[in-house]
Image (tube, grey):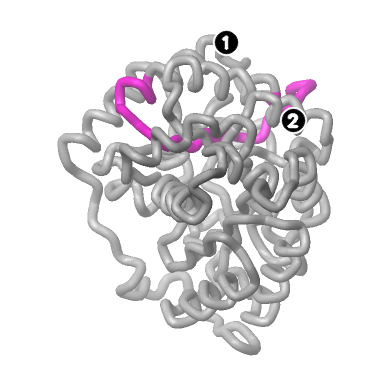
Amino acid sequence: MRGEPIRKSDRAPKPEWLKVRMPSGERYTRIKARARELKLHTVCEEAQCPNIGECWSSGTATFMVMGDTCTRGCRFCAVATSRNPAPLDPAEPVNVANAIHEMGLDYVVVTSVNRDDQADQGAGHFAACIREIRARNPHTLVEVLIPDMRGDLALLDIILEAGPDVLAHNVECVPRLQAQVRDPRANWAQSVAILEGAKARGPRQPSNPGQLTKTSLQVGHGETEAELLEAMALLRTHHVDFLTIGQYLRPSLTHLPVVEYVTPEVFARLEAAGKAMGFQYVASGPLVRSSYKAGEFFIAQHLRSRAAHPATDDAGAASPGAASAGAAAATSSEHT
């Protein structure tokens, strides 16, 4: 992958490092059943995440709000699309908060489909979810993985005012492949504007880096290793804190074909390079997804920060909504 990508047939067997066990177990079954009862969607199922068995068996999940149908048609994504999805469910924020309480989660990720049909792109619904989660689960850390809001920073403010601990938005792929991989309404410049806007809106002091931000890159679309390193360096210029890198897997024959199955050795090189660039975390591996083990990563960093700066307020290294981070970090090693 150092130069031109290696092209491989999608019909060829997947490498051993991409094979996972079928999901099972009592806790997995219970989470799935309860999500159905509350009419909640999880990106774990909708996006066909390969880690669903591991994460759900550990009692964690990533909730997908605003329905299971997206208004965009990215060529890598398994989620259904429509110009006119069903109306938003006003009870969903409360239902999500109650489900998190029942499952006893200390770190949750709330993501969504794109809702270009909504005047505010769904920003108000995100904010309502954050507030309800905090009211019902005061010690739970909240990460939101949001759409690009069409680059409207006023809509971003609506979400940030609700106080998420981590603001995530995925750039998805290297700049050269944006038009090929993503919906035409999405692009690199718009995505990094959201990430940089989130960082700029938090107080920035030596002991406080502002709003913690996170993004994700897919590999296997035909990018080179040099392009990935360049994209990572660009993300650091926008002060992104956390980065995940994972293998693209084709959901169906109507989606983009896989150009390359990247080896674990390349993922290891990318992780080392990202750490050297200054990312607080780089999770890089064939089965890594944007919300995989998110809580474990964040909590480990929080504990290290608190140990290094014992006099600093717990919220000092996070966002304004992270005042409860110390209590949650001290009692959990769950991951999403």
| Residue where numbered disc 1 is placed | 90
Q: Nearer the viewer, residue 273 or 8?
A: 273
Q: Quadrant of residue 83?
A: top right
In-front residue for pair 324/150 = 324
Mark 1 residue type:
Pro
Residue 260: where, in percent of width, then height? 52, 76
* Residue 267 relative to residue 197: left or right: left
Q: Position of residue 103 (x, y in %)?
A: 30, 27
Q: Quadrant of the C terminus?
A: top left
Q: Quadrant of the N terminus?
A: bottom right
Q: Which residues are magenta?
A: 99-123
Q: Does residue 326 appear in the picture of this structure?
A: yes
Q: Say which label, 1 or 2, has the lower sequence index.
A: 1
Foreground residue among 11 and 187: 187
Q: Is residue 92 above or below residue 27?
A: above
Q: Which residue is mark 2?
A: 116
